[in-house]
Image (tube, grey):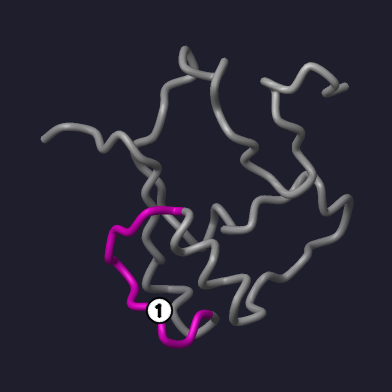
Amino acid sequence: MTTPSIREARLRPAFASLYPDMKPGVWLPACTLAEFVLERGLYQRRSGSPAKHRLLNQSHFEFRGGPTRADDSHRRPERIGDTDPTRLDAP
């Protein structure tokens, strides 16, 4: 089986009750699941800076695929508050 070229995620069954209308165990593009979480107001900020948190809680979701670390030169920001590394004015 080949690794998908896009980042995919699936909800772990143990956390299904926290995400109504999301079917656990089904691989979908991570961006699709992130939009689902935002649109339904399911994002829960944990303590600390929100800029360091991912929209999809890593204990609630499994992930696979996406660009390798070698491809980071053209990656998009992964967390709320991340800056785009390709922008010249990025800190």
Image check: 16 left or right of 45?
left
Q: How many marks?
A: 1
- The image quarter containing residue 78 is top right
In this rendering, the answer to whether 41 lies above or below 82 is below
User: What x and y, as percent, mark residue 83?
Assistant: 76, 33
What is the chief secondary structure element of the magenta stretch? Answer: loop
Q: Residue at x 40, y 79 (%)?
A: 22
Instruction: Reply yes or no: does residue 21 show up in magenta.
Output: yes
Q: Residue at x 29, y 58 (%)?
A: 27
The secondary structure type at the circle numbered 1 is loop
In this view, the residue in front, 54 or 46, is: 54
User: What x and y, as percent, mark residue 16?
Assistant: 44, 79
Image check: 74 left or right of 66?
right
In this rendering, the answer to whether 77 lies above or below 62 is above
Q: Residue at x 57, y 71 (%)?
A: 37
Residue at the extreme front: 88
Say which residue label 1 marks.
22
Task: Tell me the amino acid under the disc marked 1.
Answer: Met
Which segment did they paint magenta?
19-30
Quadrant occupied by the C terminus: top right
In this view, the residue in front, 29 or 52, is: 29
User: What x and y, as percent, mark residue 45?
Assistant: 78, 65
Q: Residue at x 41, y 86 (%)?
A: 21
Instruction: Reply yes or no: does residue 50 show up in magenta.
Output: no
Quadrant occupied by the N terminus: top left
Q: Residues within 10 Å of mark 1 (few under 14, many from 20)?
A: some
In this rendering, the answer to whether 44 lies above or below 32 is below
In this view, the residue in front, 29 or 57, is: 29
